[in-house]
Amino acid sequence: MEMNRYLAAFPGREAFYKGLSKTFIKEYTVAKKIFKEASDYMGQDLEYISYENPETKPELHTACLITHCYAMYNSIVKTIAPPTAVAGFSQGEFTALTVAESIKFPDVLNLVYRLEKLVYRSKEIMGGKMVRVVGLDIKELEKCCRQVDNKRQKVSVAIYLSNNQNIISGEKTAVEEVADLSKKRGARWTIDLESVGTFHSPLCEGILCESDLIFDQYEFSDSILPVYSCVDGRRHVKGEALKSNLRIQIAKAVRWNRIIENANEDKIKNIVEIGPGCTVSGNSRLADPDIQCTWINETKTIKDLLK
């Protein structure tokens, strides 16, 4: 793999539940220091929650995941060349902006923690669901969503991955209706996602007024690396644009297919996924089967790359 030109990509919230590898904080001093800094800042033992007791304090899980991935990244870039650009899948964009120095670490952890508390208080978000639809053309899937909910208030395409595999999100009953209709229209499978609720759907718009007030308290600088945004799939470096996109991301569809298309146009043919789960790599290959993906979850992977 050409390690001098690649997209560093970070997973979203669901990756936390795949289990976090402890190898980096065992072998890299910088990773251990980052976790101590994060724990001191948050007044919580994030290392313990991340690696020893992940069933507790769900409102801190995304903060733990960001700290884990940020610690991994800072260990990795001491060994291999820095990335050409960065991106984050869903909530992974917070990590991407952190490594690109648009938002400071550990300030990002308090921002995410406060936003997570809004999510867990929302009955609409927590009562919804997400479903992956496989084998149905995206235009046909959008038609199914409109047929069930022509006002786009209850269900919509939440994550665009490819022409024939995408994810819908919204009110539980409406999502199930679209899933059933999709199968009648030719979908091969519909797969319920192991999500804590519904994200990137109209049901998330109810928390935007409160989340805007939270975002207003944090400064976003111009990034030192281009960041591909989930909202529009384009690369940005201006702090204002990065902040504007991130603050509405939870209520907008993730355009991962566009990120991969635009990275290709920018002559980035390799992705290095940093963090647990391998979700980013799998979804990126759906968008472009020819893209080269490397998944780094343990220190052994770095050693293998350097052989």
Image (spheres, rainbow, N blue to C red):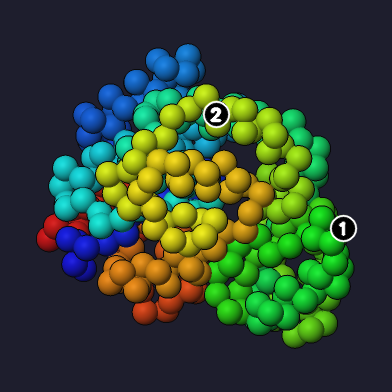
Q: Is residue 188 left or right of residue 265?
A: right
Residue 235 or 4: which is nearer the viewer?
235
Q: Which residue: 70% across, 34% down?
A: 209
Q: Is residue 103 left or right of residue 91?
A: left
Please provide percent x and percent y for residue 183.
78, 79
Which quadrant would the C terminus be assigned to in this image?
A: bottom left
Please provide percent x and percent y for residue 190.
72, 70
The residue at which mark 2 appears reads as 216
Give the mark nearest the N terminus, 2 or 1: 1
Q: Which residue: 43% across, 25% down?
A: 107
Residue 117 or 209: which is nearer the viewer?
209
Q: Which residue: 14% across, 57% down?
A: 306
Please provide percent x and percent y for residue 163.
58, 79
Three-letter amino acid code at disc 2?
Answer: Asp
Q: Is residue 242 above or below residue 184?
A: above
- What element does badge 1 sit on? helix
Crowding at mark 2 (Cα within 10 Å: few <14, some 14-19, many 20+):
few
Which quadrant would the N terminus be assigned to in this image?
A: bottom left
Q: Is residue 198 above or below residue 149?
A: above
Q: Quadrant of residue 152?
A: bottom right
| Residues under numbered marks 2 and 1 in contact, where contact means CB atoms less than 8 Å apart | no
Say how many tags the image has.
2
Please provide percent x and percent y for residue 37.
34, 20
Three-letter amino acid code at disc 1?
Answer: Thr
Q: Is residue 116 left or right of residue 285?
A: right
Q: Quadrant of residue 234?
A: bottom left
Residue 235 appearing in the image: yes
State the CA–CA distance, disc 2 to disc 1: 35 Å
The residue at which mark 1 appears reads as 173
